[in-house]
Image (tube, coloured by chain):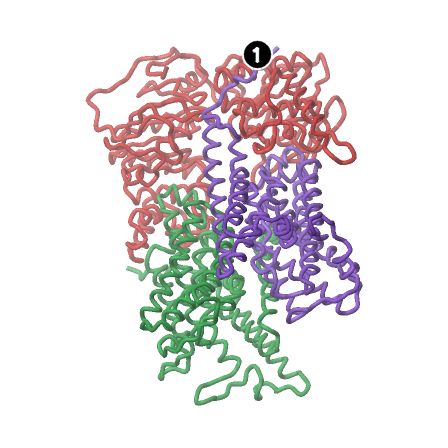
Amino acid sequence: MSPSISSPIERVESTPTLSVRGVVVDFPGVRALDRVDFDAHTGEIHALMGENGAGKSTLINVLSGLYPPREGTIHLDGREIRPRTPREAQAVGLSTVHQEIDLVPAMSVADNICLGRHPTRTGLIRQGATRRRAEAALASLGMYVDVSGSLGDHPIAVQQMVAIARAMDIDARVLILDEPTSSLDATETDHLFRVLQHLRDQGLCIVFVSHFLDQVYRLADRITVLRNGMKVGVWEVAALPKPALIEAMTGRTIEREPQNTASGSTDAAPEALLEVDGLGRRAVLAPTSLTVRAGESLGLAGLRGSGRTELARLIFGADAADEGQVRVGGARIPAGSVRDAIARGLAFTPEDRKAEGLVLDLSVRENILLAMQARRGALRPLRPPQQMQLADHYIRSLNIRTPDAETPVRNLSGGNQQKVLLARWLAVQPRVLILDEPTRGIDVGARAEIESLIARLRAEGLAIVLISSELDEIVRTCGRVLILRDRRTVGELEGTRITESAILAVIAGAGTVAGSHE
Amino acid sequence: MMVPSPPARRPAALWPALGIALLIIINALFDLLAPGGPGLVGPGAFLHVSLRDGVPAGALIDILNYGATFVILALGMTPVIATRGVDLSVGSIMAISGAVAATMSVGGRPAAESIALAVGIAALCGLWNGVLVSVLRLQPFVATLVLMVAGRGVAQMITDSQITTFHDATLEYIGLGRPSWLPLPFSFILAGALLGVTIVAVRKTALGLLLEAVGGNPEAARLAGVRARLLIVGTYVWCGACAGVAGLIAAANIKAADPFHAGRNLELAAIFAVVVGGTPLTGGRLNLVGAAVGGLLMQCLTTTMYTRNIGADVAPLPQALVILAVCIAGAAPVRAMRAQKAAR
Amino acid sequence: MRLPVSPRQIPIAVAGLILAGLIGLGAVRFEHFASFPNLANLLGDYAYVGIASVGATFVILSGGIDLSVGSLVAFTSVLTADLIRHGWHPLAASALCLVLGAAFGRVTGWLVRFFALPAFIVTLAGMFGLRAACFLIAGESVSIEHPFLRWVSSSLELDAGAGVAIPLRSLLLLAVVVVGFILARSTRFGRNVYAVGGNERAAQMMGVPVGATTIWVYTLAGFCSALAGLVFTFYKQAGDPTSAVGLELSVVASVVIGGTLLSGGVGSIPGTLLGVLILGVIRLLIDFEGNLNSAWTSIAIGSLLLGFIGLQKLIGEIGLRSTQTGGSLDRAPPTP
């Protein structure tokens, strides 16, 4: 299946500054990068695009010396390089600024820029020279800050600049920026972009990774798209319209159908179980409102990193919101209080079920029991026969494939682990169920079972919020879809208007849809 | 309907039990092979059991006589370690508890009151630790280090820096007092009873589940609505109270409160007993029986050193080496290496 | 909110005020308390705590902890005394002890690094193991008698005038503080220590040799503890296996009171000296009081440690809030 778009170009005029050929990286059980080629030239800003799990981070980590590739070569200015540590990568001129800015906030700005390369005389650091060097590096970016002050006292935007200044200070040939704008506001982003354009014009090769499509189109000259660990292609930005980019990233085709933008507010609706009003958190999510009624299932669509998970966590109270409120069945839930949320009937299965959902060393029975028992309190235990009954009930009704209820959850397959997590929440009889990527990484059979379970629960009158990257799943399961991009709501679709292509079109920003947030 | 089986527990008590067996065998071999030695069961041998004043005596009996302190300390420490904490102050809490009981007793208060106050104050010490760890979010070893060092000072102030001798039949009974119907000292019965009570409290309520969830995956526990902070405070209170009981036994054994030496060097021993009993320092598992057998192993080691004329002061050296070995064997890089080897 | 001083400097300012206040209190209550000879003595009495604290500062700066300080001091002390009793020259015995101390620290660092064991359990085992090893060497206090030591204590003193002689150990403390200060502030190793403690992941990404730094930090701490043990031994003229019990708390307290964060990455060596002086003055006050139980010392140290940790947490939260709300580029002029 090839994307129905202009065919990828290959530039031949000049030899690329950075040339990656046939790189393979394996993780236990997964091939993270499969014979990936990647070229970037001096004087260009090259966007690396793909959904999470496409291999962007892995490729960046290969270039910054964190994962040595199993196969393949990397050439810089025609010379083969094999960076095995971040130190070696920096030494040859590959400098990476990671998303969670990898600097030491407690140290001074000057130290952060010069760490590991402080100017010394007879083994002692020359403080004055260090300061001057840091100031010079920042000045080249148009930044004038007190370099003796702690880095942590400066706003994130300045820290980002310091990270870039550090890269400049090591005479980087290639500057790799991983999600540099994820915690910047619009003005800060503008400033960063001006700096990056300036650096490009001076002859730096910049590799830019971002979830924000608009930004990529503003900034980048060319785009390389990865999907499932493989390279899809490389395009001039001008030759790749947004819908085509989305197609390349997701591997799905957007049909050119007319945009139906009818509003679909239903009046005679059942009770609103979940009401979210202006819920937001600085640098995480713009204020967002939504309502989910009994028996309704609302999909949250958008690329990974668009703010879907963040919204779900703020609703559940896993993270505390700065503003806005959440009401369940009319009762307001204090921000950041998981126990209150659960008591009011909210339930949440997190995206990373192993890290945040399950206690892997505990048994199936114990994991199913956990939320109910946490709610009953330690002193009102379920008697063992009841426990077994409960566990057996869910093992049977959700078809959890496990040798028995006492098997540690660690030993179950992904789909069955997910069912255990669902069972945990069903046992406390929630009114609103928030599912974050419930089918991620699980096989087709289990996926179908979970989908039919969601349908059943909806029929029983639960309100369901479903986050999924599988658009077909959202189309099949949801009566209404909220679409997020760049950490804000950008559109809403309802009923028969929900099609994969319609969702993709909104994600790409092709059409504004009624109900879209300001 | 099928009778539900009790929760499956890992047989972690096996390792400390093997340790005890190994120590006994080594001792026996020593006795047997040493030239001019006592032989396998001759007088003075490790396995020799005699009747002294109608009461059985010998190294093996001593293990049972004096093992209670270790067992109770280990029982208290287990939930703390299971929730990824540690309590370095148990030795000092023992000293405080003994000092309180002795001072009260000398002041003429009834034994019941002395005991209640001693254990109560020990539990308060635990509460202090728990609040520092859970509310102020201090690293457990720093929070409890304060009481480890300062607590001994508190004990000294209570007894006015003296060894306070008391004469109170009830208090003394807690140590080596013997019920007429059993050849074991009361302290051992107490430890056994505490073990039983703890197992019931942990396994017959939901405590065990919640503690293991908090220790196994704190974030998952939080998102499931478990009151992690409260539970953690509770583990330290329990640990303090157990140390208080152990302190009473230690004082009763010598009929005096010694604020300088009571409970000294026992912090590491308690951690050792817990870790060797199958509760890893990284938390998430709770093994009370293993910890209790681990406590007996500690006493076995101590008694061995006594019978070999190695001073009590030197005993922590082998303990330290063994605990390091146990930790290294369970360390993540070592496990990864073993897994790699097994996969090949 | 802009404070006149940076929030980071508040703890050290508070520590300075406390020191001044304590000396003032002593001066009001007791004659001769604030006298020069008395305060000069203080430096000598607490020299070993100071030297060990300088080493521990590096460990805590790197995000670790060392609980084996007291036992290593006692071990050095007993071993030196025992060696001298067996005819070793004090200098030879000292050299051996310094090497052993550094080697012990190196093993500790290696265990922490290679097996990824928690530092507290490794150093706790060290604390108990070494203390027990003291008793293996000598069951009780061993006094030292050597002409060389008599010569050192009588000849190598700095005459500070007014009939006050500053002993060698005080000078040694000052030297260690100065060297430690330079090492922390003006060498790449020192900067690496701050980076590892401040953000280990970032340090790794920035190319700092994290593993080597960690191992060297513990090596340095072992060396400092051994040096502290030597100072202690020659000061007390004896090696006692029961000495320096609880020293680890005093050391941690000195470091934290001196403004070093227990979580690592922030702190300074001169601050640690300030912390040591505060502990010394507290000890002196309790000694002057005469009828106070000496247990008050450890209680006061513990309370002060917790007080300062509380203060740090408070300031940390305020600091966090101010950077979160102050996010703007107002200090940067437009780009070229």
Please identify which colour was used for chain B in the image: green
Using residue A254 as the reference point, say whether residue A170 is left or right of it: right
| Colour of chain C in the rendered structure image | purple
Looking at the image, residue A212 sits to the left or right of residue A323; the answer is right
Q: Quadrant of the C terminus of chain A?
A: top left
Number of on-image labels = 1
Question: Where is residue C84 shown, x and y percent of the image?
Answer: 76, 66
Query: Residue sitting at 51 percent across and 62 percent down?
Result: B267
Between C102 and C160, the one lying in front of the other is: C160
In the visual, does C217 lie left or right of A214? right
Q: Is residue A4 above or below residue B140?
A: above
Task: Give the amino acid at mark 1.
Answer: Pro
Is residue C111 visible to us here?
A: no
Chain of the residue under label 1: C
Residue B239 shows in the view? yes
Quadrant in the picture for residue B72 = bottom left
Residue shown at the point (77%, 53%) measured from the top left: C156
> Which residue lies at the image location 55% right of the left edge and 52% below the top edge?
C31
Residue to which mark 1 is pinned: C334
Is residue C114 positioned above or below A33 on the image? below
Q: Nearer the viewer, residue B134 or B332?
A: B134
Please provide percent x and percent y for residue A330: 23, 31
Q: Residue A223: x percent and y percent?
A: 58, 17
Q: Position of residue B61 (x, y in %)?
A: 49, 80
Chain A, colour shown: red
Residue in the foreground of this view, choosing between A127 and C194 = A127
User: Which type of secondary structure does the marked residue at label 1 adopt?
Assistant: loop
Residue density around tag 1, few if under 14, some if 14–19, many if 20 or more, within 10 Å: some
